[in-house]
Amino acid sequence: MFGLDLQGGAYLLYQADLEEVSSGERATVAAVITSDKRITTKNKERMAILHAEDRTEKAKVVVFPKTYQKYRGNLGEGSVVLLDLKADLDDEGEIEYFAEAVVKFPNNPERVVVDVTEISPHQREKVKNWLLNTPGNIPVYIRENGSKNILPPGFWTSLEYLDQYNLGASVRVVSK
């Protein structure tokens, strides 16, 4: 799943796809906004209806007025965003999504922090494979049991293929 921590400009990432989010669940997904319709409610408040897509499906996302007020600068066709969503069923039994946060994906990450404190050996292997197979210029820090150590430059990464590794570990992408 893609999860999101909006504290201090840090983004917690885990991979999830829209198709995996069931009614009653909350999740955060990375998506591209393909259309952005702004409307005014009966109470004269602004809100938006987005169409967004990730690598698995396209979906309509409702952005209610309070959320719209806070994140309206992040909306716009073509924006790559992290959508903090709540899923529910509509009257026809179809999944509909409601945004609770819309955050632009960081363009120039400063560093990546991987917390391996509570992950399985299998997940550690996935993190290792990700780091070995996605070389780049973004420094990587490993956090374990409260200590944080930077990896040598040979293990620095690129976020280009992060979604293909289905990492269950907490991965924070910290932007400048």
Image: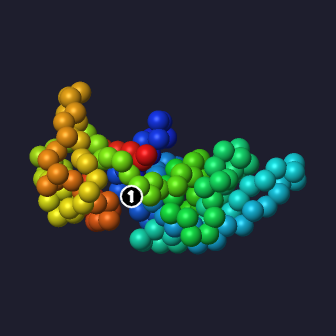
Residue 6 drawn above or below residue 58: above
Q: Residue at horizontal 59%, vertical 47%?
A: 100
Q: Is residue 127 left or right of residue 16?
A: left
Looking at the image, which is closer to me, 134 or 4?
134
Which residue is depicted at the point 75% across and 62% down? 38
Residue 130 horizontal/vertical position (percent): 20, 59
Give the class, few, some or many, for how many residues have Cα within 10 Å of label 1's Cα (few <14, many ≥20): many
Q: Is residue 160 left or right of residue 86?
A: left
**Can residue 100 be seen in this snapshot?**
yes
Q: Which residue is rendered at x = 36% and y = 48% of the image?
A: 110
For residue 74, what is the image quadrant?
bottom right
Report helix, strand or loop for mark 1: loop
Q: How many marks?
A: 1
What's under tag 1, amino acid-wise? Answer: Ala
Q: Residue at x 46, y 68 (%)?
A: 54
Please name the residue that numbered disc 1 is placed on: 16
The percent coordinates of residue 53 (x first, y second) are: 51, 69
Q: Is residue 83 visible?
A: no
The x and y percentages for residue 150 are 19, 40
Q: What colour scheme does the image use?
A: rainbow
Q: Position of residue 50 (x, y in %)?
A: 64, 64
The image quadrant that residue 98 belongs to is: bottom right
